[in-house]
Image (spheres, grey):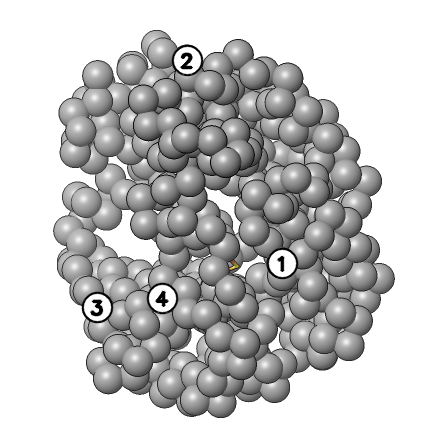
């Protein structure tokens, strides 16, 4: 009832466990060396059986294993989930099946087992190619592991590879000294443009690796993460906002020069290798999220509905749903506008005209351009994506 069966649709499977917590992470992760593989499989399959009927008739285009660290999950469990999802929906074309992976999990036997289970795309958390940054990030892999993982994945054949990088990693502050609460970290780092330029060494490493896709995230220091305290007491010094903006634009140009299309704020692809699953999120496609903390979106005749699951396995086992919200057609249309403006496809000028003054503002401030009847964001528009979203939904009033 109220469904739109011809729309592309994806299934997201969340695996919440990690070996340890990275100090910059404020996600709801659970730390375990040996997660409850089988119990979690049963829970996810139970949720699938319950939710699948409400997405009947959809055209499945993607399955995505995210986390947490889904590369920790027993490959038998991964294979069982893929089989169960494929049994429920027809796929009219090739299905994208992505596994997020830690570089150290990309060992040849494991990679081969993923491939045999149907995984055809691996998103590797390289994060940095610099030893000092990996140490600050507290990752359990070392310099060179990320690039070696990409090479192993490519050697396996038939696998597309995406690499995740983090930019704007804080520098270490003075050791053992007094806390520096009065000296803002941003002040300390002002003018350190050389550090920003040096960050771009990884772009050549990426280009040489032949990975088809990259996601580049700016590190933000969230209140709940261990980094927050380290920044507050001066042990870590994040780069100032100006340097980060400069770095963002530099990354855009550097990757474009090496054949990568900047097709979404944080996403870059060689031609023909955009992420199918992630693109669903930005284009109004439907998705079913399975597992702890996973979110779902389904269109209805009266707009849409979004819901998300509880964020601890123990709670999720008792009762899955954390939040469910009906979305009105007006809000849904607004969401599609601001999400569309986070991509290089932009949105139809005709659709944006429904929001008075927005097109004029975007074009006038160099945040977007008109291309074949579409309003398409510039790199400056990508930088100010949050302000654009606020203006469109009217939540913050814009300028
Ligand atoms: S950053 Fe990733 S690997 Fe590290 S704790 Fe968070 S989810 Fe786990």
Q: Which residue is mark 3?
A: 322
* Dot in front, 1 or 2: 1
Circle 2 sits on which residue? 366
> In the depicted view, which residue is nearer to us: 254 or 189?
189
Q: Residue furthest front?
A: 177
| Disc sitting over residue 294 in the figure | 4
Between disc 4 and disc 1, the foreground one is 1
**Local crowd size for mark 2, using a 10 Å CA cut-off: few (<14), some (14–19), many (≥20):** some
Q: Nearer the viewer, mark 3 or mark 1?
A: 1
Q: Is residue 298 above or below residue 148?
A: below
In the drawing, does residue 205 fall left or right of residue 133? right
Mark toward the viewer: 3 or 2: 3
Say which residue appears at 34% left-offset and 10% top-offset. 364
**Is residue 5 visible to the viewer in this orientation of the structure?**
no
Q: Earlier in the sequence, mark 1 or mark 2?
A: 1
Vertical order, 258 against 119 (above or below)? above
Where residue 381 appears, x then y in whole percent?
42, 23
In the picture of the structure, the residue carrying the numbered disc 1 is 140
């Amino acid at each position: 009832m109220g469904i739109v069966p011809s729309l592309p649709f994806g299934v997201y499977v969340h695996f919440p466990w990690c070996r340890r917590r990275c100090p910059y992470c404020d996600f709801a992760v659970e730390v375990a060396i040996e997660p409850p593989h089988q119990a979690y499989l049963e829970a996810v399959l139970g949720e699938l059986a319950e939710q699948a009927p409400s997405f009947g008739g959809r055209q499945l285009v993607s399955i995505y294993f995210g986390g947490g660290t889904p590369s920790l999950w027993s490959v038998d469990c991964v294979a069982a989930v893929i089989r169960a999802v494929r049994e429920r929906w027809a796929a009219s074309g090739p299905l994208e099946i992505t596994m997020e992976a830690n570089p150290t999990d990309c060992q040849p036997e494991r990679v081969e087992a993923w491939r045999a289970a149907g995984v055809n795309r691996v998103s590797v958390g390289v994060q940095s190619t610099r030893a000092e940054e990996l140490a600050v990030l507290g990752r359990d892999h070392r310099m060179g592991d990320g690039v070696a993982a990409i090479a192993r994945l490519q050697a396996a054949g038939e696998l597309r590879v995406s690499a995740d990088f983090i930019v704007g990693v804080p520098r270490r502050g003075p050791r053992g000294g007094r806390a520096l609460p009065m000296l803002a970290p941003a002040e300390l780092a002002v003018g350190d443009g050389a550090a920003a330029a040096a960050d771009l060494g990884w772009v050549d490493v990426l280009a040489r690796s032949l990975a088809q896709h990259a996601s580049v995230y700016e590190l933000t220091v969230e209140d709940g993460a261990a980094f927050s305290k380290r920044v507050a007491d001066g042990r870590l010094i994040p780069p100032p906002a100006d340097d980060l903006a400069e770095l963002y634009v530099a990354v855009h140009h550097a990757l474009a020069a090496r054949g990568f299309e900047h097709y979404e704020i944080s996403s870059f692809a060689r031609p023909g290798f955009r992420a199918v699953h992630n693109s669903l999120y930005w284009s109004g496609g439907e998705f079913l999220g399975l597992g702890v903390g996973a979110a779902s979106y389904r269109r209805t005749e009266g707009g849409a509905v979004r819901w998300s699951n509880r964020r601890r396995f123990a709670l999720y086992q008792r009762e899955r749903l954390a939040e469910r919200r009906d979305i009105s057609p007006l809000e849904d249309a607004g969401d599609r506008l601001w999400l569309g403006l986070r991509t290089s496809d932009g949105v139809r000028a005709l659709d944006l005209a429904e929001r008075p003054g927005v097109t004029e503002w975007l074009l006038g401030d160099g945040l977007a351009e008109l291309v074949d009847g579409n309003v398409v964001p510039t790199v400056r528009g990508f930088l100010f994506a949050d302000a654009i979203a606020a203006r469109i939904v009217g939540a913050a009033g814009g300028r």
